């Protein structure tokens, strides 16, 4: 029987994952718009109109023995994080109630906050500072409490980069501080390699990091990236100061997945 992979939140990242899984599994994707649903159907994807908090019946029809990839961020403009969190927990409960086999949750390395200058491993204590990060920690903890009922894989992503996406573009021409802060980035192609391994292989029942393996200062890196992209470079203060900020250590996670990230060096990302 072909495996069902249900991707809840078929956005930018999901499109890359879906392309990689095409032909290997049966993909079901959710979207909030009719236009996007029709576009997904044209790509051969079973598409469902669904927004977080709505009735889950149609979605649950596809979930028995399936892998559910939860890729629904709260959104930058969402101020009701309590509602977002509760709706996510209810979706998780609904999936478990119909015997979903495996839940893969896309989380974020922002769960560690920005107050530390330490190297952060997969077992480091979370210190969420923003409402979004706190919501992610709550969802992570809830999922981990369900181990035994369902297989769980929690994937904490660093800052996203792709062929059509790089932070240097949004920073172009700006005057910024903390040029000595270290960067933590991950390329979408490496994310896809990891998620394909997790979905098509053995569930983790644990937490992993996905991040590059080097962490230059942002005041150097983003200036170099802007020059390479031929856009106005940002200007940073404090670049000459000692490196500061957290370092996301993903070495053990990549080793666990038996993956050598193609973009382990952020300088390969532009």
Image (spheres, rainbow, N blue to C red):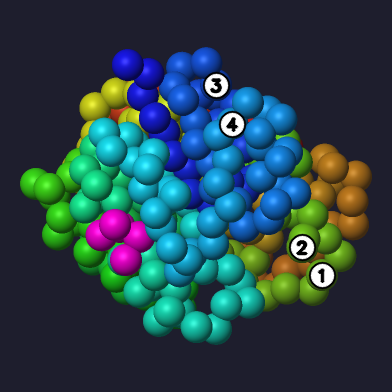
* 8 w.r.t. 114: above or below: above
Q: Earlier in the sequence, mark 2 or mark 4?
A: 4
Q: Nearer the viewer, mark 4 or mark 1?
A: 4
* 97 w.r.t. 241: above or below: above
Few, some or many residues within 10 Å of mark 3 (<14, 14–19, 20+): few
Q: Is residue 141 visible?
A: yes
Few, some or many residues within 10 Å of mark 2 (<14, 14–19, 20+): some
Q: Which mark is residue 45?
A: 4
* Residue at the spot of label 2: 171
Q: In whole angstroms, how far apart are the C-alphas of marks 4 and 1?
A: 40 Å
What's the magenta region?
90-94
Q: In whole angstroms, how far apart are the C-alphas of marks 3 and 2?
A: 34 Å
- Give percent across and percent down for residue 170: 77, 61
* Residue at the spot of label 1: 174
Point out the image quarter for the N terminus.
top left
Point out the image quarter for the C terminus.
top right
Give the main secondary structure, helix, strand or loop, of the magenta stretch: helix
* Residue at the spot of label 3: 22
Q: Is residue 46 magenta?
A: no
Q: Nearer the viewer, mark 3 or mark 1?
A: 3
Callout 2: SS:
helix
Q: Residue at (45%, 69%) from the top-left corner?
A: 53
Q: How many marks?
A: 4
Q: Quadrant of residue 230?
A: top right
Specify whether 109 is left or right of 263.
left
């Amino acid at each position: 029987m072909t495996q069902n992979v249900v991707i809840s939140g078929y956005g930018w990242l999901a499109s890359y994952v879906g392309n990689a899984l095409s032909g290997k599994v049966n993909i079901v994707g959710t979207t909030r718009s009719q236009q996007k649903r029709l576009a997904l159907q044209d790509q051969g994807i079973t598409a469902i109109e669904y927004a977080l908090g709505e009735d889950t019946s149609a979605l649950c029809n596809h979930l028995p023995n399936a892998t559910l990839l939860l890729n629904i961020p709260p959104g930058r403009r969402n101020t009701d994080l309590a509602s977002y969190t509760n709706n996510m927990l209810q979706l998780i409960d609904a999936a478990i109630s119909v015997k979903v086999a495996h839940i893969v949750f896309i989380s974020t390395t922002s769960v560690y906050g920005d107050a530390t200058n330490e190297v952060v491993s997969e077992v480091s204590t979370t210190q969420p500072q923003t409402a979004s990060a706190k919501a992610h920690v709550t969802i992570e903890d809830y999922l981990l409490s369900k181990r035994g009922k369902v297989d769980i894989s929690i994937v904490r992503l660093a800052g996203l980069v792709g062929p059509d996406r790089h932070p240097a573009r949004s920073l172009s021409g700006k005057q910024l501080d903390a040029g000595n802060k270290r960067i933590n980035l991950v390329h979408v192609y490496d994310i896809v390699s990891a998620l394909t391994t997790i979905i098509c292989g053995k569930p983790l029942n644990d937490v992993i990091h996905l991040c590059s393996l080097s962490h230059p200062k942002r005041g150097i890196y983003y200036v170099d990236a802007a020059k390479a992209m031929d856009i106005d470079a940002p200007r940073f203060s404090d670049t000459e100061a000692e490196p500061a900020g957290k370092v996301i250590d993903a070495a053990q996670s990549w080793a666990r997945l038996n993956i050598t990230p193609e973009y382990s060096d952020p300088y390969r990302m532009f």
